[in-house]
Amino acid sequence: MSLADLSLPAPGTVTMFSTAWCGYCRRLKTYLEVEQIHYREVNIEESPDAVAFVEEVNGGSRTVPTILFPDGSTAINPSLAEVQERLGL
């Protein structure tokens, strides 16, 4: 899966690539929910295409959470403040 194969998140939302066991993912999801920032979660353990995308944008690493923004940019394990800033909130 490449960026060209993904539908980008709607303005004001993000796509979060995560795993079920990732504490950083759970923390960021909680922050997003508290701040009412909508997100789509993709568990990379359930999608080989998602693994390929995460590896592509992270230089071969499977680091999560990896966030995809509406402009097509990504961030690895961003803070809530970074997500808000990049969404223009």
Image: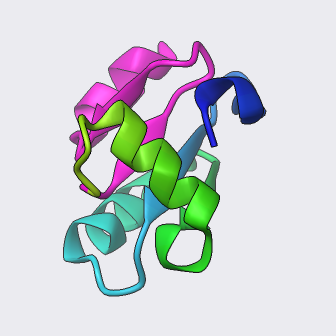
Q: Looking at the picture, tell me which residue is in the foreground, 74 or 48.
A: 48
Q: Give the residue at the far bottom of this rendering.
A: 21
- Residue at 60% across, 33% down: 2
| Residue 63 x %, y % | 24, 55
Q: Is residue 38 visible?
A: yes
Q: Would residue 66 be found to the left or right of residue 82 on screen?
A: right
Q: Is residue 31 above or below residue 87?
A: below
Q: Looking at the picture, tell me which residue is in the foreground, 77 or 1.
A: 1
Magenta residues, start to end: 63-89
In magenta stretch: residue 24: no
Task: Indicate the quadrant containing the N terminus: top left, top right, bottom left or bottom right.
Answer: top right
Q: Looking at the picture, tell me which residue is in the foreground, 29 or 9.
A: 9
| Residue 23 x %, y % | 22, 77
| Residue 64 x %, y % | 30, 58
Q: Is residue 41 visible?
A: no
Residue 14 picture quarter: top right
- Residue at 61% across, 27% down: 3
